[in-house]
Amino acid sequence: MSLPFPLAEAPSPAAEEAGRKLFATGGDFLKGVVAMSGMPPADRLEVCFAGRSNVGKSSLINALTGRRSLARASNTPGRTQEINFFTLEESHYLVDLPGYGFANAPVAVVAKWQALLKAYLSGRPSLRRAFVLIDSRHGVKAVDAEIMGLLDRSAVPFQTVLTKADKVKDAEREKVLDQVRGALAKHPAAFPELIVTSSEKGWGIPTLRATIATME
Ligand SMILES: Nc1nc2c(ncn2[C@@H]2O[C@H](COP(=O)(O)OP(=O)(O)OP(=O)(O)O)[C@@H](O)[C@H]2O)c(=O)[nH]1
Ligand SMILES: [Mg+2]
């Protein structure tokens, strides 16, 4: 019997090569957006990285593009406070989102960017897939489930990416994976395969690149 929400298989050599090629250019920062009116034209394939503050969204974009500081990563939760658009060739946007949940910033400021985050996730026509990042140590929390519910209602398919896999032992990782699978079962917009990553070690990065490069 196959488990629901299996780990993604290693990409085929052709898919891996497509991923390598797409990301070989490294990507460029386009703009930081603070209101829906500031969004660039919805004219290409777009994927975004959503997740709790500090889960590793910006670090994952840096690992994918092979650039240490394309996206600003930091130890301070709430570092990313705008919706940051990166271009990959002429064909793709990668979108780094502000974190949800705890943030080390004034309440009014947080409320403003959380509203923008929700407007973006529910109303961006070219958003093809949201990657929802979950910390390998913590699993799916209530705030994650809330975002997943928003994606369900907005009919935005989302794929779960486990982050910081280098920080857990195998047994602990399996336990968290089971919790994640249980939580995903409640979300019709959840994509079936999970991707386990470590931006620090490069784990899962070729798989994620191939996934993005081979998306229709
Ligand atoms: N060990 C380890 N640490 C990581 C990994 N990914 C991110 N980190 C660390 O986690 C912290 C937060 O990473 P960010 O990439 O800034 O997280 P974020 O989700 O963009 O955070 P916000 O923008 O504040 O929401 C940083 O100190 C990173 O170095 C990983 O794969 N392994
Ligand atoms: Mg960030």
Image (cartoon, rainbow, N blue to C red):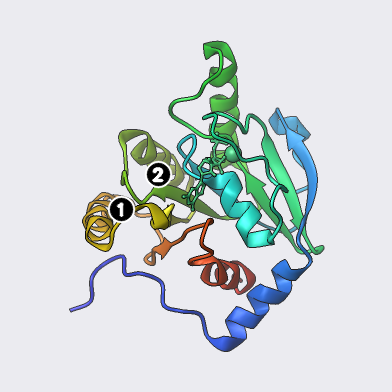
Residue that appears at 63% across and 44% down: 96
Front residue of 126/192: it is 192
Tell me the CA gap for discs 1 and 2.
Answer: 9 Å
Residue 166 in which image quadrant: bottom left
Placement of 114 over or under 85, stated as above or below: above
**Residue 5 position in % (x across, y down):** 31, 65
Residue that appears at 80% across and 64% down: 89
- The amino acid type of the residue labelled 1 equals Leu
State yes or no: discs 1 and 2 in contact (Cβ < 8 Å). yes
Reading the image, the residue beneath label 1 is: 184
**Residue 127 position in % (x across, y down):** 61, 52
Label disc, if present, on residue 197 of the rendered structure: none
Q: Is residue 121 left or right of residue 19?
A: left
Quadrant where ligand 2 appears: top right
**Residue 130 position in % (x across, y down):** 53, 52
Label disc, if present, on residue 148 of the rendered structure: 2
Of the image marks 1 and 2, the number of the one nearer the N terminus: 2
**Residue 117 position in % (x across, y down):** 57, 33
Q: Is residue 118 visible?
A: yes
Residue that appears at 60% across and 74% down: 214
The answer to whether the residue bearing label 2 lies less than 8 angstroms from the nearest atom of ligand 1 is: no
Helix, strand or loop status at disc 1: helix
Q: Is residue 124 left or right of residue 92?
A: left
Residue that appears at 60% across and 29% down: 116
- Residue pushed farthest bottom? 13
Q: Is residue 82 left or right of residue 100?
A: right
Placement of 81 over or under 61, stated as above or below: above
The quarter of the picture where the N terminus appears is: bottom left
Q: Is residue 47 visible?
A: no
- The amino acid type of the residue labelled 2 equals Met
